[in-house]
Image (spheres, rainbow, N blue to C red):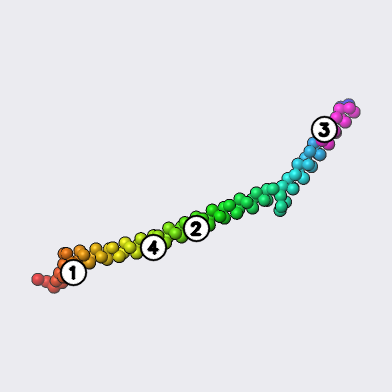
Amino acid sequence: MSQQEQNKRINQLKRQLVNAVERIKTLELDIEPDGRISEAFSVLEKHIDNRFDQVDNRFDRLESRLDRLEHQFNRMTAKLEVILDSITGISDLPEDDI
């Protein structure tokens, strides 16, 4: 390899090294605690936390509604039992042998 080709190759490697160093510096700035990537993760984390809070609230409301419906269903069942008993007189059936 001639001296000129060696110098050309060395200069090319120097440019690549300088380019790599600049890219590393950019990544370090983006990743550091106040960098863009860290900031983006913080924003995403807050958004996800808010969504989970909304879902939790909806589940709480749904659970409360289900509790009320279950209570209403139990009351209706008890009323129907009283009505059926009154109509059929099943509870008045004798227990002794006839």
**x then y, percent, for residue 18:** 81, 39
Q: Quadrant of the N terminus?
A: top right
Can residue 41 be seen at all in this image of the molecule?
yes
Label whose residue precedes the other's in the sequence (2 or 3)? 3
Tell me the residue at 16%/67% (across/down).
89
Span colored in magenta: 3-15
Q: Main secondary structure of the magenta part?
A: helix
> Closer to us: mark 2 or mark 3?
2
Q: Residue at x 61, y 50 (%)?
A: 44
Q: Nearer the viewer, residue 86 or 24?
A: 86
Sequence-wise first label, 3 or 4? 3
Please, what is the three-letter code of the amino acid marked with disc 2?
Answer: Asp
Which percent across, then down, holds residue 66? 39, 60
Identify the amino acid type marked 1: Ser
Which residue position holds label 1?
A: 91
Q: Earlier in the sequence, mark 1 or mark 2?
A: 2
Q: Is residue 48 left or right of residue 40?
A: left
Q: Please, what secondary structure does the residue beneath circle 4 have? A: helix
User: What residue would you read off at disc 2?
Assistant: 56
User: Circle 4 is placed at which residue position?
Assistant: 67
Q: CA distance from mark 3 to mark 4?
A: 74 Å
Q: Is residue 30 magenta?
A: no
Image quarter for residue 14? top right
Is 9 part of what is drawn in magenta? Answer: yes
**Residue 90 in sight:** no
Task: Kindly report the distance in space between the C-alpha atoms of the residues bearing marks 2 and 3.
Answer: 58 Å
Measure the alpha-carbon separation of dots 4 and 1: 30 Å
Q: Nearer the viewer, residue 84 or 21?
A: 84
* Residues at marks 3 and 4 touching, judged by CB atoms closer than 8 Å: no
Q: Give the spatial CA distance, label 3 vs label 1.
A: 101 Å
Identified by mark 3, the residue type is Gln
